[in-house]
């Protein structure tokens, strides 16, 4: 009996938008995945882990993706441009969030939060 085909584009989208909840891990590995539940336990760190996960998933070659997640599904992946657009948007959003976090950290450390 073939396993369910795991869509790489959907996994990238879930990681980019809902990575802080670990939805991409629940989609890929199911409810028994420890790291999916760890995302729910540590939401501030999970935001950045979700962005990194989206980049890793999106940049994985289709052949390697199929070997890891779709070995017994009977289908092959053909990601196309949608996953590349998601990777670029994820990189832009993730780097903006990182810069904002660093700036806010310096604000809190150097001024005691006087600027916001």
Image: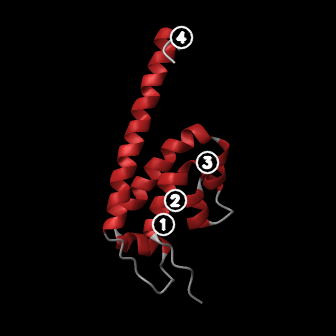
Indicate whether 114 appears above or below 26. above
Q: CA distance from mark 1 to mark 3?
A: 18 Å
Closer to the eye: label 3 or 4: 4
**Rendered residue at 46%/11% (across/down):** 110
Residue under pointer 1? 10
Asked if residue 111 can be seen in this view, the reply is: yes
- Report crowding for label 1: few under 14, some 14 to 19, many 20 or more residues within 10 A (C-alpha): some
Indicate whether 99 appears above or below 108. below
Dot 2 falls on a residue whose secondary structure is: helix
Residue under pointer 2? 14
Q: Earlier in the sequence, mark 3 or mark 2?
A: 2
**Rendered residue at 48%/77% (across/down):** 70
The part of the image, by quadrant, that contains residue 96 is top left
Q: Tags 1 and 2 in contact by the CB under 8 Å rule?
A: yes
Asked if residue 60 can be seen in this view, the reply is: no
Per the rendering, the mark at residue 112 is 4
Q: CA distance from mark 2 to mark 4?
A: 36 Å
Dot 3 falls on a residue whose secondary structure is: helix
Where is residue 22 shown, x and y percent of the image?
A: 59, 54
Residue under pointer 3? 39
């Amino acid at each position: 009996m073939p396993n369910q085909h795991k869509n790489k584009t959907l996994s990238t989208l879930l990681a980019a938008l809902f990575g802080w909840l670990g939805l991409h891990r629940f989609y890929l590995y199911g409810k028994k995945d420890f790291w999916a539940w760890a995302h729910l336990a540590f939401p501030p760190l999970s935001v950045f882990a979700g962005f990194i996960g989206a980049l890793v998933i999106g940049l994985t070659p289709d052949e390697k993706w199929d070997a890891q997640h779709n070995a017994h599904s009977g289908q092959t992946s053909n990601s196309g441009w949608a996953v590349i657009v998601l990777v670029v948007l994820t990189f832009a959003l993730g780097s903006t969030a990182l810069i904002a976090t660093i700036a806010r950290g310096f604000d809190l450390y150097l001024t005691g939060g006087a600027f916001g």
